[in-house]
């Protein structure tokens, strides 16, 4: 595995692919499109030229911020990618 790259944009298909890889409930493309449009902050992790993890912050843009959908592909878990995602989102909130 090469270096992990973090980007602040998640595409609908990337979101669906990652949540399905970890067994989360799947949603329609419309639902995900709307959810991503209403997301405060988002991060995707890229390794080996593919998206291997995602995370979002949802909230009211004033007081409440919640981490959501922190997911890492099973074959990339245990490598610190989830921690990288969480730390990046925390820095964005601060």
Image (spheres, helix red, strand yellow):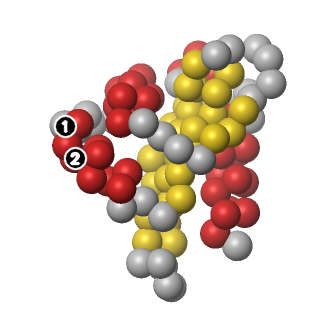
Bin the neighbour count of mark 1 within 10 Å (Cα to Cα): few under 14, some 14-19, many 20 and up: few
At 51% from the left and 72% from the top, the residue drawn is: 65
Horizontal arrangement in the rendering, residue 45 relative to residue 16 (left or right):
right
* Residue 74 in which image quadrant: top right
At 76% from the left and 14% from the top, the residue drawn is: 1
* Residue 50 in which image quadrant: top right
What residue does disc 2 label? Answer: 31
* Residue 82 in which image quadrant: top right
Q: Position of residue 29 (x, y in %)?
A: 23, 36
**Alpha-carbon distance for marks 1 and 2?**
5 Å
Number of marks in the image?
Answer: 2
- Residue 28: assigned label: 1
* Of residues 84 and 5, the one drawn nearer to the viewer in this rendering: 5
Bin the neighbour count of mark 2 within 10 Å (Cα to Cα): few under 14, some 14-19, many 20 and up: few
Q: Are marks 1 and 2 in contact (CB under 8 Å)?
A: yes
- What is the secondary structure assignment of the residue under circle 2? helix
């Amino acid at each position: 595995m090469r270096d992990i790259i973090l980007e602040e944009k998640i595409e609908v298909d990337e979101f669906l692919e990652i949540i399905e890889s970890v067994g989360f409930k799947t949603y329609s493309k419309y639902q995900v499109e709307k959810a991503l449009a209403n997301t405060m902050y988002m991060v995707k992790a890229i390794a080996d030229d593919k998206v291997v993890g995602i995370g979002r912050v949802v909230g009211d843009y004033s007081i409440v911020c919640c981490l959501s959908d922190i997911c890492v592909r099973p074959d990339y878990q245990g490598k610190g990618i989830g921690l990288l995602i969480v730390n990046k989102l925390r820095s964005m909130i601060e």
